[in-house]
Image (cartoon, rainbow, N blue to C red):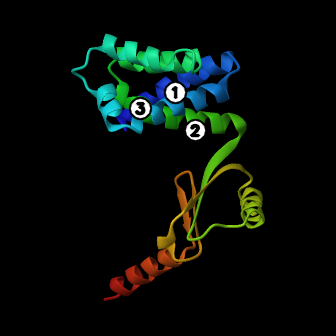
Amino acid sequence: MANETLARRYATAVFSLASDANVIDRVGTDLAAVQRAIDEDASTKNFFVAPIIDRKDKERVLLAAFEGKVHDVALHTVLLLVRKRRETLLGELVAEYRKLELAARGAEPLVVTTAKELGADELRAMVERLERAYGKKFDVTVKLDPALIGGVRLTMGDRRVDGSVAGRLEELTRTLFAHN
């Protein structure tokens, strides 16, 4: 929780700088790209978060890898995390920045998880119904999870609506064991 609060503070400051420079989307995309580049290779990730590696060495590597390839606000954000020994906050900072981006657009995240892929029309109709019902705009992410067996699981912020077969079976199991 403390890391989330700290990451939110950094993300808010970065978002403000990006907003002033009118590069909100670019900085968000670049921060996520830097995070992916670091996280996708275990040795790179270990190098980035290792407290015993000199901060100047980390800065040199980051500059060599990303200077001129990502926006300066994104690059200097990552460099600041290194200087402050807060490298482990990068993932949470990116997540918090994303929340600020969505809020600025008036959208909320919606994760639609299904057992099989939905058709584009079917997905669009479902999202439109949800937007009317909740009076909100949603930024939709679709995930496939064959373990759901069938149906749909929706996650809207901290709210979860489980209409999947697996979810109903879990609920039935809880009900049966609660009465014994």
Element marked by disc 2? helix
Label 3, residues with CA under 10 Å away: few <14, some 14-19, many ≥20: some
Whether label 1 touches label 2, CB < 8 Å: yes
Q: Please name the residue shown 67% across and 67% down the image.
A: 118
Of callouts 1 and 3, which one flags the residue occurring earlier in the amino acid sequence? 1
- Which mark is nearer the camera, 1 or 3? 3
The residue labelled by disc 3 is: 38
Q: How many marks?
A: 3
The residue labelled by disc 1 is: 11
Whether label 1 touches label 3, CB < 8 Å: no
Res. 155 image quadrant = bottom right
- Residue 37: give x, y in percent of width and height: 46, 33
Q: Which quarter of the figure is the C terminus placed in? A: bottom left
Q: In the rendered view, would you say 149 is above or below 36?
A: below
Amino acid carrying label 1: it is: Ala
Q: CA distance from mark 3 to mark 2?
A: 21 Å
Whether label 3 touches label 2, CB < 8 Å: no
Label 2, residues with CA under 10 Å away: few <14, some 14-19, many ≥20: some
Question: Can I make out residue 4 in this image?
Answer: no
Q: Is residue 33 left or right of residue 173?
A: right
Amino acid carrying label 2: it is: Lys
Res. 121 image quadrant = bottom right
Question: Can I make out residue 25 in this image?
Answer: yes
Res. 172 image quadrant = bottom left
Q: Is residue 105 left or right of residue 162?
A: right
- Residue 8: give x, y in percent of width and height: 48, 30
Element marked by disc 1? helix
- Residue 106: give x, y in percent of width and height: 71, 40
Q: Please name the residue shown 50% across and 71% down the image.
A: 146
The residue labelled by disc 2 is: 99
- Nearer to us in this view, 174 or 92: 92
